[in-house]
Image (cartoon, helix red, strand yellow):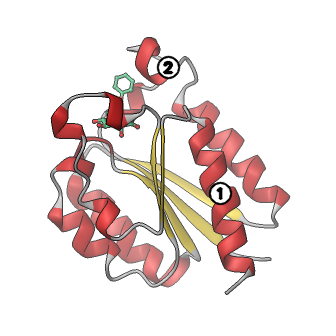
């Protein structure tokens, strides 16, 4: 298998491992990136791992992924619950999209129960900690191999 998975991270995830470890764990985003790169490598795939606090930047990366990526793994963070613009961008992408949440959003506040991104996602992983990113990469590899 060959190809690049875009792994996109939304606002505040740059603080992973530095604040609220009781919710999001103690691994940093750099730790997650290293694990994602190594997991993708086991499938012969590459990862472009990106984080932004800006909605437009995430949308621009999704547009870039249309030309460059075989799949998107996305933790849109708070934009999950607010962004029709990110949903619209993902709807222009033709490959698999897997939505990841580190925490179990379904055990949390009511406003986290709705996801615009889930209207496009082929799979959703929540509450598995940062392992969710690795599970998403395994799922992408399976989907690519069977299509
Ligand atoms: O559980 C997730 O991965 C979330 O996407 C994280 C978002 C939250 O708004 C979603 O409802 C669920 C928040 C990301 C904030 O990340 C931080 C990480 C460490 C410390 C502070 C914030």
Q: Residue 137 has which mark?
A: 1
Q: Earlier in the sequence, mark 2 or mark 1?
A: 2
Quadrant placement of the C terminus: bottom right
Foreground mark, 2 or 1, reads: 1
Q: Quadrant of residue 19?
A: top left
Q: Secondary structure at mark 2?
A: loop
Quadrant placement of the N terminus: bottom right
Q: Is residue 19 shown above or below 138?
A: above
Residue shown at the point (38%, 70%) measured from the top left: 62
Count of marks overlaid on the render:
2
Residue shown at the point (29%, 28%) measured from the top left: 108
Q: Position of residue 130 (x, y in %)?
A: 57, 35
Mark 2 is surrounded, within 10 Å at the Cα level, by few (under 14), some (14 to 19) or many (20 or more) other residues, namely: some
Q: Quadrant of residue 103?
A: top left
Q: Residue 17 has which mark?
A: 2
Q: Position of residue 20 (x, y in %)?
A: 38, 14
Question: Does residue 36 appear to the left or right of 116 in the view shown?
Answer: right
Q: Position of residue 47 (x, y in %)?
A: 64, 59
Q: Secondary structure at mark 1?
A: helix
Does mark 2's beta carbon lie closer than 8 Å to ligand 1? Answer: yes
């Amino acid at each position: 298998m060959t190809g690049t998975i875009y792994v996109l991270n939304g606002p505040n995830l740059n603080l992973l491992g530095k604040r609220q470890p009781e919710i999001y764990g103690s691994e940093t985003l750099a730790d997650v990136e290293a694990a994602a790169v190594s997991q993708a490598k086991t499938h012969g795939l590459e990862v472009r791992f990106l984080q932004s606090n800006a909605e437009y930047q995430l949308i621009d990366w999704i547009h870039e992924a249309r030309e460059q990526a075989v799949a998107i793994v996305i933790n849109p963070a708070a934009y999950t619950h607010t962004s029709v613009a990110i949903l619209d961008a993902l709807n222009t992408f033709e490959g698999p999209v897997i939505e990841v949440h580190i925490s179990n959003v379904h055990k949390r506040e009511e406003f986290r129960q709705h996801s615009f991104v889930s209207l496009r996602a082929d799979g959703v992983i929540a509450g598995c900690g940062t392992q969710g990113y690795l599970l998403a990469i395994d799922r992408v590899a399976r989907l690519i191999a069977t299509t």
